[in-house]
Amino acid sequence: MTRGCWNAGPRITVGSNQFAVGRRQVDDIMAHAMLHAWLILTGAADLNESHGRARYAAVRRLSPVVLGRDLDVYRGADRRSVRAPNPAYAPDNDQPKTLVRKVRDRAAVAHDDIARWPGSLRPVGYDFGEPIPCPTY
């Protein structure tokens, strides 16, 4: 999404260097940017909060068509709370025995991957198709 002095709603631009990667790379960039635009235009998110619950719901709905597979993703599912021994604890001080820590759930899709959807979830070696001839400026 292009920011700056453009005030007529969301505006999507694609860097000319991406055309050399392939047609499906441009498709992924457009799908990503159109999702941002849709979230903004529907009021589901603004430019500062475009990776929240509404985005996860949209990714769940769109992934079967865009990626060819379901994604069971939810905001925060890649983290869980665990209790860990408190290294500062001693029987004679008032520190708690354990502390609650957030740890990554490696089995879940990471938030960073959802933030960069759909390209981040393409398999290694994915064929982005033929390049699109696009002379640079």
Image (cartoon, helix red, strand yellow):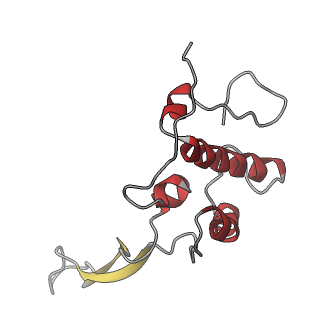
Q: Position of residue 44 (x, y in %)?
A: 77, 57
Query: Which residue, as the protein is rendered here, is positioned at the far front?
Result: 130
Classify residue 56 as left or right of residue 8.
left
Q: Nearest the camera: 106 or 24?
A: 24
Q: Quadrant of residue 62?
A: bottom right
Q: In which quarter of the image is residue 12?
A: top right
Task: Name above or below for residue 27 compared with residue 105.
Answer: above
Task: Name above or below for residue 106 compared with residue 15.
Answer: below
Classify residue 49 as left or right of residue 117.
right
Name the image quarter holding the C terminus. top right
Q: Where is residue 26 in the image (x, y as percent from the top left)?
A: 59, 41
Please name the residue shown 57% across and 69% down the image. Answer: 75
Task: Name above or below for residue 55 compared with residue 137.
Answer: below
Q: Where is residue 121 in the image (x, y as percent from the top left)?
A: 48, 61
Please name the residue shown 52% across and 46% down the image. Answer: 129
Q: Nearest the camera: 117 or 74?
A: 117
Name the image quarter holding the N terminus. top right
Please name the residue shown 50% across and 28% down the image. Answer: 17
Q: Where is residue 109 in the image (x, y as percent from the top left)?
A: 46, 70
- Total marks shown come to 0
Classify residue 49 as left or right of residue 101.
right
Please name the residue shown 85% across and 30% down the image. Answer: 8
